[in-house]
Image: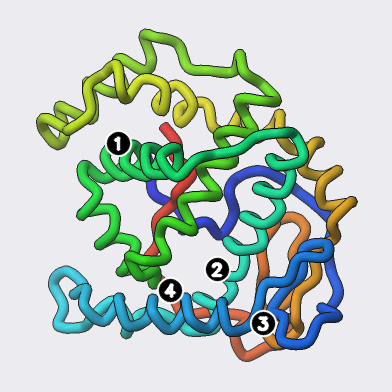
Amino acid sequence: MKLSRLLAGVGLLMLVGTGCTTHAGAAAQVGSQTIGTSQLRGIVDRGLKAAQTVPIPQTSQSASQSLNRGELQRRTLTTLVQLELISGEAKRLGISLTGQDIASYYQAYAILQFGSVKAFEQRAAAAGFAQQDVATIVRSGAFESALGDKISPGVLASDADTRAQYDSIVDQIGKIPLSYRQAKPYLARFLVADKRATKARPLLAQAESRDPISINPRFGTWDTKQFAVVAAEGSIASKPAPTPILDLTTRS
């Protein structure tokens, strides 16, 4: 498994959506749903504070000193926009997730990707996400997985591949608090995430057409190819500083 970006995109799509919001106090809108600037600011402020507690290996700096606030705002807003679109489409299709569903996904992702929940949350803190906000981010992955089950239930990794991946994880980090039986359903989906994402693209393109995405220019603009909020052209943040990174979309 490899690390990439912390939900700079859930690996799903190329959609259309530009323009500015029409609601006062909005950082973004997805259809009629508003993502408030206060919500965005709160997550970013907590994330920067959390990063101060994480030292960068072999340096005397904290992770927060390598974070760019503007870039963190865009990554966070990207996550919130994607969550709104994906969860809205899931609801339209009659898909619902309980708190236990989200918690189980959270635990499985953290253990299978990082070896433990603690290690995952520390890595998330280094990337600028406080513990209390990581669950919000993980919801996108959980709903993405549920959508995949609805759209392409037969797209799953083989028993041989999931067994091999599980054994590889145990070989690398030792015994984990998930048996193979418990881990298998998640690994079967994680290992073919790209294929499942391809299947989801047309459906989510339709969802975005029904619920256009608009971004407050103060925070950037919408990039259709990346399906992410990016710095506005000519902005001083158009070339952001490198940031600690990880990905919630598990890949093999």
Disc number lying in front (2 or 4):
2
Quarter of the rendering containing residue 23:
bottom right
Q: Identify whether 64 is placed above or below 175.
A: below
Where is residue 3? Give x, y as percent.
39, 49
- Residue drawn at x 62%, y 29% is 148
Indicate the quadrant where residue 12 lies. Answer: top right
The answer to which of 20 and 247 lies nearer the viewer is 20
Q: Circle 4 is placed at which residue position?
A: 242
Amino acid type of the residue tagged 2 in the rendering: Arg
Residue type at mark 4: give it.
Pro
Mark 3 or mark 2: name the one nearer the start of the chain: 2
Classed neighbour count for the residue bearing mark 3: other residues with Cα under 10 Å, few (<14), some (14–19), many (≥20): some
Is 163 or 102 nearer to us in this picture? 102
Calculate the distance from the C-alpha at mark 3 to the C-alpha at mark 2. Answer: 10 Å
- Name the mark on residue 75: 2
Q: Which residue is mark 3?
A: 219
**Vertical placement of 240 versus 227: above or below?**
below
Above or below: residue 198 compared with residue 157: below
Q: Nearer the viewer, mark 4 or mark 3?
A: 3
The tag earlier along the polypeptide, 1 or 4, is: 1
Residue with the mark numbered 1: 112
